[in-house]
Every structure is written in C-alpha cells, then in structure tokens.
Amino acid sequence: MKKIWPILVVDDEDVMSESMAAWLREDGYRVDTALSGQQALELAKAMNYAICFVDLKMPGGMDGIETMMELRRIRPEASIIIITAYATVDTAIQAMKEGAQEYIVKPCHPQEISMLVSRILKLKKLQSENVILRKKISRQYRHRDIITKNTRMEEILSLTKDIASLRSTVLICSESGTGKELIARAIHYSGARAEKPFVSVSCAALTETLLESELFGYEKGSFTGAEGQTKGKFELADGGTVFLDEIGDISPKLQADLLRVLQERRFYRVGGTDEVSIDVRVIAATNKNLAEEVKAGRFRDDLYYRLNVIEIRIPPLRERREDIPLLVEHFVERIASELGKDISSISAGALKTLIDYDWPGNVRELENVIERAIVTSHNGTLVEADFAWLNQRNHPDQNWVVPDIPLAELERKAIIAVLERKGGNVREAAASLGIDRSTLYDKLKRYDISH
C-alpha cells in the first residue's frame, strides 16, 4: 500500500532545510522543516514522523545528537538520519551509537536522498504489513492495540489493565459492533493467562443442543453422528479464558448449566458420567440489558449476579466521535494493504462525512464502510463521493411509503431481501444491515429464516 509518510528536516540553515524539503516534496512526501532542535521536538509531539533528517552542528541550544536523542524518546519508531559537513569515522560512530540509522554528508545530492528515503520506507512498509499480518493470524490484541483518545474509553482500558490477571468474571455490555471481543482479548492477553488459550463462542449463532455440545463437549454415541469423544470450548480453554458473546441469548437450561460451571468449575460432557474440572476465566458480552431481561423473567438473576462481578460498558461510536479519524486512518492502512489497493489517504470532506454520521453499527460498520469505499475507489485518496450513499442512510427517501404491516414482519422481509441480494452470505448481509453477525443469526432464528 502506498502511504504518505511524513518527514521532518531539522537544519538551522533555512536554505538547506527548504532545499531538501523541496526535493522530497517532488517525490510526493509530506515534509515539515524546523530551524532548531526545540522546534523539531514541538513538531514531533504533534506528528508521527517516519523519518527525521537532523543536522549534526546547530549552534545555540541543542545540537544534532541531543535533538536526535530527544526525538527518539518522543518517536521511538522514527528513523533518524544525521546530516553532517564533517564526515569522519568519529562522527559516524557517535551518531550510530546514539541511535542514528544513517548519516549523509553535505552537500546533499537529491538522487542520494531519494534512494535513501525509498529504501528506509520500503523497510517500514514491510514491517507495517508484517505487524498487520501477524496480528490478523494470531488475533492477540493488547491494550496498546486499542485505538482511542476518548476519556471514557481510556478509563475502561485503565480498568482492564487492573483486572487483567484476576480470575473474576467480567460482563461487557454495549451495542453491537463496538468491539466487545477486542476488549475481552485485551484483558486476556495482558494478564497472567496470556500464554493459555482464548476461546470465543457466539451464543446467538447456535441452537440450544449445538451450543451445549459446543460448550461442554460430548461422549461417543451421545447423539447421532457423535463418533468419538470431543472436548468442548470450556475444556479447550483450560487455564485460559472463555469469551461468551451474546450471553443474553442462551436458553434457560444452558443458563442453569453455566451457573454450575461458574460456581463449581466442573461440568459433564453431553452424554457423559464423569465430571470434568477446569480452571477458566469467563468473560461474557451482550448487547441486551440483562437487568431488564432478569425483570422480564428471561434471564436468571443468580446467573446475572455471577456474571456481573466486573461490568464494563463500552460507549457507542456516536458518543466518541473524536476516535473516528484515528479509526479511519487505521482501517484505511490495514484494509488497503490487505486488498492490495493503492489508497494513501482520505480527504477532509470525506472525513467530515464520516464524523457526522451516527454509526448505528458502530466500529464494525465503520470498518465495513471503509472497506466498501476502498474496493470501489479509483483514486489514491478517498473522497466525499466514495461515501455519498451514507447520506441516504442519514436522510432516507422521504417519498418512500412504509408498508402497512407489523414492524417484525417488515424487519423479516428486509433481512430476507438482503440475504437474497448477498447470495446467502451472512457476514455480508450483516454488514449491509449494519448489525453484528451474531445479532443477525439471532434474528434468523427468531424469524425462522433459512440461509
């Protein structure tokens, strides 16, 4: 993926810094200049520079080595290139010892600088793609991988750090698409159980019988097709964490079984007579109001209190709009890289469109919208036209007449229509509807829709 990597040039000679900046801008890079070490540090606090060119000799205040050391403290991932008019072995050794990646000698030649920058950024691109690939394969997310500058989210991350190594059960409550599993994985992989399994189960995607077998395993011959003993998710997660997504959808029988597991840390496989003992931490998540479900008699109060030892409520995306630019930048970089598309940035107008939208499907919907825009875009920059269809969601056609049928039937027809349009693909249908896959599975079951 092509990316506009920001570059900083630090030189007390205005002519020198502007000349180098002009050469680099001709190559398509964003370049800022600073005439002193102090000015460079102020710029680096506000911008994550990929490369910093720093003049070794700068009279008055901070010299090049001091500037480089402070830049490395502020931006440890930045590559520092020292510029010197005094090319000696001693200066090279000192610069490299203090963390410079390269050094070049004045007078600088544009072709030499272009080749050097290209080589460094090629390596950074590979490193960035490797990080994305490793994370995609392992799906091991820690607190530092959660993108936010929202105060409430930062408080949540602080709480999850405090509880990461505890065995206490956690209940994560939020709307669909806010990143409940991401928070659960951050808790697991930041705690003492990080080297043990993290096992995720969608409680809404399976029938009661299948979910029971999925959670607890089964013995040979316990039902038709049970050809051998099979371990369930709780056994597979022994020593680690079980994440029960959409816990509010489980049946009364499974609620009783789960309560016993939480109380005694033991259970029977389906069709089994021997108790299985386990050591697992349970993190549950729901988009329902479980307190209301308890009042309505649909959820056991004793199970609710067992699950709700530590409660985390994730704010919806519309309540943390300051995170949208950060998330957009992350999704553009990752998705464009995965799809092999030459998308480098997003325009200010397009970003405003995304910030103004209400995001009923939250972060997952934002990710899907960015993917759609990248797939259909023919430019290196995402622009307002790539998101024009979002305005139709915010301002639906006023001439459309709602059929005179019950709301549930209207929803059922909408789901069937989207499924048909997506060829039965539940993931794509859920994305188009702006809901979580597990929520769609729940609705498919509720409306008896085959797919």
Image (cartoon, helix red, strand yellow):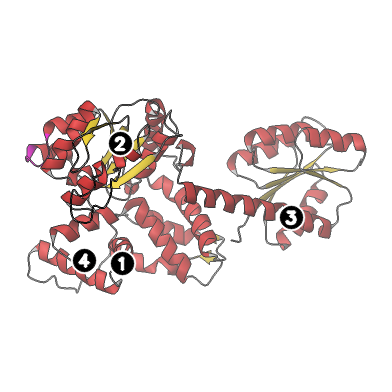
State the image quarter where residue 344 is shown.
Answer: bottom right
Q: Position of residue 369 (x, y in %)?
A: 39, 61
Q: Nearer the viewer, residue 96 or 132?
A: 132
Q: Position of residue 30 (x, y in %)?
A: 65, 55
Residue 415: give its label. 4
Badge 2 crowding class, 10 Å Cα cut-off, few under 14, some 14 to 19, many 20 or more, is many
Q: Position of residue 332 (x, y in %)?
A: 50, 57
Cα–Cα gap, marks 4 and 2: 30 Å
Q: Is residue 428 above or below residue 318?
A: below
Q: Which residue is mark 2?
A: 283
Cα–Cα gap, marks 1 and 2: 28 Å
Among numbered discs 1 and 2, the one appearing first in the sequence: 2
Q: Amino acid type of disc 1? A: Asn
Please give the range of residues in magenta.
Answer: 295-300
Residue depth check, mark 3 versus mark 1: number of the one nearer the observer:
1
Residue 119: give its label. 3
Q: Main secondary structure of the magenta part?
A: loop
Q: Are marks 1 and 4 in contact (CB under 8 Å)?
A: no
